[in-house]
Image: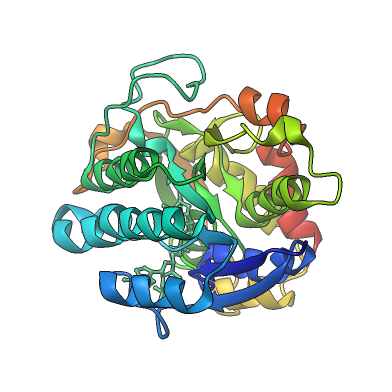
């Protein structure tokens, strides 16, 4: 049976990619902010009751990490209350809820990759509200898959890659944090992994061995780097790319790169409203063991963005 899929948040980095890939799995109805405002629980209930999907995929979230410190109520409404309502409605109709969470549920005090069951301790409002969303889904009794990902970027949207490219056209020197370590993950890889997993779960060979494959899974690129390392890799590619490539021309506003120097600095020298973990590398072993899905190394993912231009 082809599942009826309700994709919530089709305009974000992950949502856009899911919107083009999920039709491989089932019949997709997708809703953006214009059709469904997640700060309004009644709208969420109405949408789910109207579509009665077999599968709900929530790619929307309040992702402005620094702004969340001063917009706690809105961040909580979108990241905690909305997923709780989705889960409640999913349970009523027996739908599977697929949701995304973040490496920022951890405090970064570990020095080796975090496993799913490691203790959480978010350092900022965004991480706290995302954790509340996870817990609400798990406590709802709805069938669920929660994919924790990290440092998401794409060739469009709001992300670190595009910020660095813009700044590289405006400044000769960039000071970049070198003591926060994570795994930059392309949204296309998250959507592709999600699609593969859902194809397994809803495919013809629907393995009964996967019926219990529910709960939290880490889903990030392989390897790890710092924001400084990521910046150096981005600029290496940027110096070689054909500048007329449309997404690159948009990112740089058609201006040449003038950056000469990238200076590594500790986070303490770049104060932000939200504090961030110093180390938030996630172990993807459970994902690999359960679904035989492994996302490429972060360097390979970055290569692909610049190569598929
Ligand atoms: N971005 C990261 O670095 C990162 C890191 C770790 C985990 N994650 C998680 O990965 C998932 C996907 O993130 P992403 O990077 O694709 O996020 P994104 O690009 O920021 O997209 C988020 C989407 O949510 C929508 N949204 C926000 N508030 C809404 C509201 N009140 N009603 C309806 N829609 C609303 C936004 O709508 P508009 O387009 O109208 O603004 C946007 O389309 C999220 O669960 C996020 O928490 C992201």
Q: Position of residue 51 (x, y in %)?
A: 52, 76
Q: Nearer the viewer, residue 167 or 202?
A: 202
Q: How is the image coloured?
A: rainbow
Furthest residue toward top: 111
Percent of width and height locating residue 156 = 57, 69
- 299 to the left or right of 94: right
Q: Quadrant of the N terminus?
A: bottom right
Direction from residue 158 to residue 301 in the image, left or right:
right
Quadrant field for ligand 1: bottom left
Left or right: 74, with 190 as reference point = left
Q: Residue at x 41, y 19 (%)?
A: 118
Left of 79 or right of it: where is 227?
Answer: right
Position of residue 15 relative to residue 33, above or below, is: above
Depth check: give the residue in front, 247 or 255. 247
The image quarter in which residue 71 lies: bottom left
For image coordinates 28% across by 52% down, the residue present is 80
Is residue 240 in view? no
Q: Position of residue 119 (x, y in %)?
A: 34, 20
Q: Number of labelled discs?
A: 0
Q: State which quadrant residue 75 falls in.
A: bottom left
- Please name the residue shown 65% across and 73% down the image: 28
Quadrant in which the C terminus appears: bottom right
x%, y% of residue 161? Answer: 54, 56
Which residue is rendered at x = 74% and y = 58% of the image?
Answer: 306
Image vertical order of residue 158 relative to residue 204, above or below: below
Report if residue 177 is visible in the image. Answer: yes
User: In terms of depth relative to the viewer, which is nearer, 61 or 224?
Assistant: 61
């Amino acid at each position: 049976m082809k599942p009826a899929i309700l994709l919530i948040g089709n305009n974000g980095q992950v949502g856009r990619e899911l919107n083009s890939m999920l039709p491989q799995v089932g019949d997709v109805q997708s809703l953006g902010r214009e059709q469904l405002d997640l700060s309004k629980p009644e709208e969420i209930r109405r949408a789910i009751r109207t579509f009665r999907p077999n599968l709900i995929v929530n790619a929307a979230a309040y992702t402005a990490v620094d702004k969340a410190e001063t917009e706690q109520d809105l961040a909580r409404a979108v990241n905690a209350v909305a997923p709780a309502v989705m889960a409640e409605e999913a349970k009523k109709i027996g739908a599977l809820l697929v949701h995304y969470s973040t490496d920022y549920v951890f405090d970064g005090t570990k020095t080796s990759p975090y496993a799913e069951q490691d203790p959480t301790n978010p350092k900022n409002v965004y991480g706290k509200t995302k954790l509340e969303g996870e817990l609400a889904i798990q406590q709802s009794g709805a069938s669920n898959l929660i994919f924790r990902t990290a440092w998401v970027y794409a060739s469009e949207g709001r992300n670190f890659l595009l910020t660095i490219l813009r700044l590289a056209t405006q400044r000769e020197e960039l000071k970049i944090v070198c003591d926060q370590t994570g795994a930059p993950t392309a949204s296309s890889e998250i959507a592709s992994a999600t699609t593969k997993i859902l194809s397994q779960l809803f495919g013809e060979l629907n393995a009964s061995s996967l019926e219990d494959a529910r709960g939290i899974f880490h889903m990030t690129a392989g390897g790890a780097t710092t924001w400084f390392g990521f910046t150096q890799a981005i600029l290496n590619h940027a110096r070689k790319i054909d500048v007329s490539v449309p997404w690159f021309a948009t990112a740089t506003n058609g201006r040449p790169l003038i950056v000469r120097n990238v200076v590594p600095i500790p986070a303490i020298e770049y104060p932000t409203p939200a504090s961030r973990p110093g180390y938030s590398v996630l172990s993807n072993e459970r994902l690999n063991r359960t679904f035989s899905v492994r996302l490429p190394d972060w360097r390979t993912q970055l290569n692909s963005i610049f190569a598929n231009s």
